[in-house]
Image (tube, grey):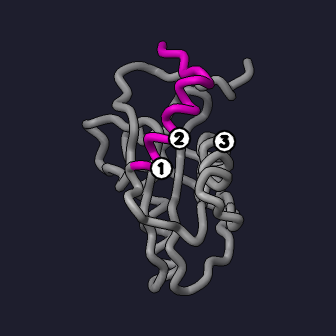
């Protein structure tokens, strides 16, 4: 298990924003719960006031479920540039399903994805990513 500390997170926010290389989203859409802290910090750093969340359930604790449930999808302006963020792309299934659902529901929206951690073997690779994950990650915001 890898413990992801706040100081690393602060540095990663800066590295992530540098990766954007001029891309300025109109909306940051965080996948709850894991992407909420990341989304909040990005909205502050990028000065994006339109910060929304949606819910996606694909895990029960550390057990992967057979289906992905996506709900609480916000209304998005037709031509908005939307950065969809989460803490990690593990299998890729959740982010893939979220992006598919959003593109289906908002066909003229412009969606990009970003995460703090990703796995190289994932079926979905985000547009923006920071760290490759090799172990289970315990995030500093997971208070247990």
Q: Residue at x 38, y 38 (%)?
A: 118
Q: Residue 50 occupies which quadrant of the picture?
A: bottom right
Does residue 138 show up?
A: no
Q: Which residue is mark 3?
A: 37
Mark number displayed over residue 111: none
Q: Is residue 30 above or below residue 104?
A: above
Please tell me how crowded label 3 is: few (under 14), some (14-19), or many (20+) other residues with Cα within 10 Å: some
Please tell me how crowded label 2 is: few (under 14), some (14-19), or many (20+) other residues with Cα within 10 Å: some
Q: Which residue is mark 2?
A: 13
Let me know if residue 143 is in the magenta part: no
Left of 133 or right of it: where is 137?
right
Between disc 3 and disc 2, the foreground one is: 2
Residue 68 location (% of width, % of height): 52, 52
Q: Mark 3 or mark 2, which has the lower sequence index?
A: 2
Q: CB atoms at circles 2 and 1 under 8 Å apart?
A: yes
Mark number displayed over residue 17: 1
Question: What is the spatial separation of the Cα atoms under label 2 and label 1, in whole angstroms?
Answer: 6 Å
Helix, strand or loop at mark 2: helix
Residue 91 location (% of width, % of height): 37, 40
The residue most toward the right is 143
Q: Residue at x 68, y 70 (%)?
A: 74
Question: What is the spatial separation of the Cα atoms under label 3 and label 2, in whole angstroms?
Answer: 11 Å
């Amino acid at each position: 298990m890898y413990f992801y500390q706040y100081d690393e997170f602060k540095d990663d926010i800066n590295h992530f924003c540098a990766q954007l290389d001029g891309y300025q989203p109109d909306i940051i859409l965080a996948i709850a719960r894991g992407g909420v802290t990341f989304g909040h910090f990005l909205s502050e750093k990028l000065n994006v006031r339109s910060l929304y969340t949606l819910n996606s359930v694909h895990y029960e604790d550390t057990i992967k479920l057979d289906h992905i449930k996506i709900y609480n999808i916000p209304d998005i302006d037709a031509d908005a540039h939307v950065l969809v963020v989460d803490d990690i792309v593990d299998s890729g299934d959740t982010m893939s399903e979220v992006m598919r659902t959003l593109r289906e529901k908002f066909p003229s929206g412009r969606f990009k994805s970003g995460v703090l951690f990703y796995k190289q073997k994932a079926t979905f690779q985000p547009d923006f990513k920071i760290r490759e994950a090799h172990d289970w990650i315990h995030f500093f915001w997971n208070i247990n």
